[in-house]
Amino acid sequence: MIKIEDYPLSRVPENKRVSFLSVAVVHMGMLTALDQFMLGSVLGDSMDLASAFLAILAGSVIFGIVTWGLGYAGMREGISGSLLARWCGFGRIGSVLIGLVVAVSLLGWFGIQNAIFAKSLNFALGDRLGFPLAASLSGLLLTVLVTYGFKALRVTARIAVPLFICLVAFISFHTLSGHTLQQIIDLPPTGSPLTISAAITMVVGGAIVASLMTPDLTRYSKSSKHVAGITLLTIIAGEFIVNGLAILIARTLQTADVVTIMSQAAGGVGLLVVILSTLRVNDLNLYSSSLGVINAVEGISGKKLKYRSTTLVIGLLGTLLSVLGILDRFVDFLTVLGVVFPPILGIMLVDYLLLRSHRGLLDRSRLLGELPKDSETPVIGWVAIIATLVGSAVGLLTEWGVPTINSLLISCVIYYVVKLAQQRSRPAAASA
């Protein structure tokens, strides 16, 4: 059985590795969720059918490459993504900063999912509460439950995933059975138009946090073939099935609003499943975000924050984001994720697979079943951090090309060239 919280600062022993299916099911769960359905609904309501599926294909290729690469590194070393970053360009403090970026992104996801929860609750009550009050109540309720370890949330998590999959299957059959594919293709998009490049960036942004979390799971895997299979199954299930069906449903119903889709197709049952799904996702979002902030503060300042007070503060911030309308900025949120995270992942892969800056150190310590010593670990990787900032800025501020590819390639090229120059200058300096 996989437990992400196990072996937080050590390698997963070879005798603790698990079967292909054990890892694959957990990994697929990250992309067979409500957020992917939301993304597909936006694509289906804003683009023609061919363009929407082309965006999924292109985004899946980018996601697949970086996910397999990081998953392979995690499998080979038996360590999590945040630990791996220490010896893949970013150093100890740099890896802590990555954890903080992940925590902030999960805070954004908390706000978005809570907004969906609140819209569903308000819709079910006939708009008696109003969205601001509904979002405040739902956010505060979930924050208190997660803060005090309410065990019922764990039960909710177990039933929410199969219920959501069953709901998607039911809505797909109910909505699409009366239409031919040509009829769906002929329907005009009703949402704000999206370009192919923007849609690709959104697809990457919707899944890229899962890429960074992949080593947390594949460190339990037994081979690179397992990692490749896990990545492929996740893409098929999350991008082409959940995302693809959402595109078709949104085009058929002529809306991208998930609450409207669920209520029209499945009534009160659909709204209940949406609420359970947001509970399941936000439980993990708030928990992981709190741990990320605690670890970041401790790594930078040495001060250890209390879990409960940190969770309460983060939950309040996420609730505030919901009330302020982060759901209306869903496209912008995915775009930011799609240009900020690819540079981080790309630099880690360039360092691990091409430059191999610390591969010898990792190999020697792996034979002993240990991690490299602190004295051998870089404190902070300035080149990696600067390359990430430059790549992200280019992706956000330029209008040419595909933003997510721009940020990925530019950051990787900058990092590779500068680090290669540094490596070549050291022997010359030593011989002089």
Image: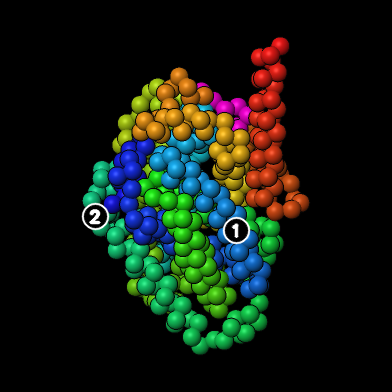
Question: Magenta includes 384?
Answer: yes
| Residue at 69 percent of width and 58 percent of height | 197
Q: Is residue 300 left or right of residue 346?
A: left
As drawn, which residue projects farthest toward the left?
151
Question: Dots 1 and 2: beta carbons under 8 Å?
Answer: no
- Image quadrant in which you'd find residue 5: top left
* Closer to viewer: mark 1 or mark 2: 1
Q: Which of 212 and 314 lies nearest the eye of the viewer?
A: 212
Question: Magenta includes 14?
Answer: no
Looking at the picture, which amino acid does disc 2 mark?
Ala
| Residue at 48 percent of width and 43 percent of height | 73
Can residue 360 be seen in this snapshot? yes
Q: Is residue 358 above or below residue 343?
A: above
Q: Is residue 277 above or below residue 50?
A: above
For the image shown, how many numbered marks are present on the structure? 2
Dot 1 alpha-carbon crowd within 10 angstroms: few under 14, some 14 to 19, many 20 or more: some
- Image quadrant in which you'd find residue 372: top left
**Which span of residues is magenta-colored?**
379-385
- Image quadrant in which you'd find residue 162: bottom left
Q: Is residue 300 above or below residue 3?
A: above
Q: Which of 29 and 102 lies nearest the eye of the viewer?
A: 29
Coordinates of residue 304 in the picture (x, y in percent): 35, 26
Dot 2 alpha-carbon crowd within 10 angstroms: few under 14, some 14 to 19, many 20 or more: few
**Of marks 1 and 2, which one's residue comes earlier in the chain?**
1
Mark carried by residue 61: 1
Residue holding disc 2: 152
Looking at the picture, which amino acid does disc 1 mark?
Val
Quadrant of the frame with the C terminus: top right
Coordinates of residue 351 in the picture (x, y in percent): 58, 36
Coordinates of residue 2 in the picture (x, y in percent): 32, 50
